[in-house]
Amino acid sequence: MSKKIGDVILDLQNISLRFGGVKALTDISFDVREHEIRAIIGPNGAGKSSMLNVINGVYQPQEGVIIFRGQERKKMEPHHAATQGIARTFQNIALFKGMSVLDNIMTGRITRMKASFVEHALWLGRARREELEHRKKVEEVIDFLEIQHIRRTPVGRLPYGLQKRVELGRALAAEPSMLLLDEPMAGMNVEEKQDMCRFILDVNDQFGTTIVLIEHDMGVVMDISDRVVVLDYGKKIGDGLPDDVKNNPDVITAYLGVSH
Amino acid sequence: MIYREAGQFKTSYAADQQLFPIRQDRIGVILLLVVAFLIVPAVAGEYWFSAILIPFLIFSLAALGLNILTGYAGQLSLGSAAFMAVGAYAAYNFQLRIEGIPILVSFACAGLTAAGVGILFGLPSLWIKGFYLAVATLAAQFFIVWCLTKFPWFSNYSSSGVISAQKVVILGHEFASPREKYLLVLTLVAVMALAAKNMVRSSTGRAWMAVRDMDVAAEVIGIRLMPTKLLAFAVSSFYCGVAGALYAFCYLGSVEPDGFSLDMSFRILFMIIIGGAGSILGSFLGAAFILLLPIFLDIALPRMAGLLGLPFSNATVSHIQILLFGTLIMFFLIVEPHGLARLWQIGKEKLRLWPFPH
Ligand SMILES: Nc1ncnc2c1ncn2[C@@H]1O[C@H](COP(=O)(O)OP(=O)(O)O)[C@@H](O)[C@H]1O
Ligand SMILES: [Mg+2]
């Protein structure tokens, strides 16, 4: 790869996560390097979404450590993850459906806005200034994703594909250094998928954002990712370059459903 | 072609982020303020001030408070009247116990007291949601009214907890007539409505709505649920508290704890359901509707009955009222959850396109 992939910035060591009796993740270790596109693949229920939830603190693993930018933690807090530059999208769209596209994306910048509610109520200098400054940034995101025409639309009224794009916009608005994408192309038609692929590559390219991507479409994964982790029943069964993973017998078995 | 934005291009984000970006809306609001501040005081009679306009404004303020909590932040509450009671009794006690405290300072402190109590009763919202939270706020409703009745200190040992509000004197001028009280209430309500509008159009409001719409996603974006929810409880209760103080000082003159009943909390809730949850305008529309409909029916129903030659007793009139309210509330809950404010919005969108259908 000609890209300037950097050092490890996220290192997950021996992560185990249980829900009662269900072992969602068992002793999983892998790392993510700066500026790379790291894919997580695996059959349904393999634990991919749970993995992202561990990374940004929605779920708290019973065992293991998370080292992000040199800081070692037993668990993340969602709020910490956000302020440290981790943003994400969800498998089932999690937009704020009562708000417009513009407000949804503006909300993505909330950790960067400092004015208090009193300043907002009185619409004092800083409150007004911040709204304008951040609006400018948000408009850049809107231009980047080519959604100018739906700015004012309540997100609930948008078709599925556009909602996914707005959700990406909300994540990008935070100017994250790491972006976690949970099946960003699921349920899209070919054209929408191509658009989404282009956006992901552009984000990675132009802003140097590190991307952790869950995706089912193997073609897409092989095309755009630098390294791939394969999960099955909560265990890691493969990790490496796309070509290596593709030819890994365990992975082939898992995907074809053949028993050992 | 009267109401439209054609030709009003926004050349800056500042222009786009004005309070009312469309010129006709701006003119409308200015006209409304002129009417409310200049024309109404000149023409309205005493009955209008004391029986209609003052309670309308006060309940609009309370509905606005509840709307911040329920409509914007998504936390259902059945305790609005109790927070009004806190405001009323707090203002009374500040006036009573602190020598020479200005009345407006008392009102503000009453709001802050209610905010404090609101935060306390908002704590359960950190663990429970929806129906269960509503039940917890119901506890607030009963507990607060019980406290005010039970501990005579709050009413300065008057019989059965009744308090008589002190005189309203600002800078040596006594606001005694209904007209003057109306102007005072109107000013406070206008200022607080503006402040509410400012909050909900900035990141404070976006944080509330984010928590309302999808709390997990809100957290992941970096919104901390606890301070966001508690702030909504505080601000909401502040508004209800000030409304309660005005209710005692500018409307009824004397109040008792039982006056701030669950029934009143429900009426405020109905105001935001009918007016529009998550809308400042809706709070006013809802208050107007709920307060004016009974008055209208009181006058209209017996006349209609008279025309038709039907025997109508007062009881029948109140039964019909209840029936009509029930039907309307079900209608709005099912058909138009965003209430009258949304209908108004749709009307404007139609007008924007008129006379062309698309
Ligand atoms: N919040 C939860 N509560 C209980 N079980 C869960 C929860 N989240 C995930 N699981 C379980 O963990 C396993 C992995 O799920 P998930 O991470 O969603 O898989 P994937 O995203 O790979 O399809 C599944 O068995 C699922 O039922
Ligand atoms: Mg999943």
Image: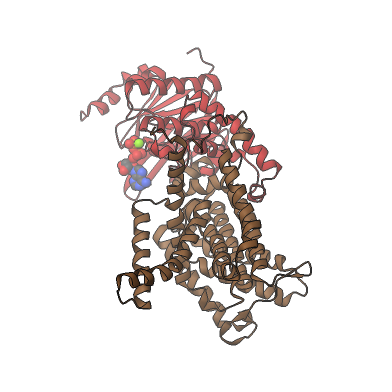
Chain colours: A red, B brown
Is residue B87 in view?
A: no
Q: Residue A23, located in which quarter of the rendered image?
A: top left
Q: Is residue B261 visible?
A: yes
Q: Ligand 2 falls in which quarter? A: top left
Q: In terms of depth relative to the viewer, which is nearer, B27 or A121? A: B27
Residue drawn at x 52%, y 69% is B81
Viewer-nearest residue: B65 or A43: B65
Left or right side of A31 for B304:
left
Q: Position of residue B118 (x, y in %)?
A: 56, 64
Query: Front-most of B356 and B257?
Result: B356
**Residue B38 spot, x, y in % from top left:** 66, 57
Number of callouts: 0
Q: Which corner quadrant holds the C terminus of chain B? A: top left
**Direction top: furthest residue:** A2
Q: Which of B340 and A41 lies nearest the eye of the viewer?
A: B340
The answer to whether B21 appears left or right of A44 in the picture is: right
Residue B184, percent from left and from top: 67, 63
Q: At x 66% / y 40%, what residue is drawn? A: A128
Which residue is depicted at the point 60% across and 63% down? B115
Q: What's the residue at 65%, 61% (across, down)?
A: B42
Identify whether B249 is placed above or below A13: below
Tell me residue A246's x, y (percent). Answer: 32, 19
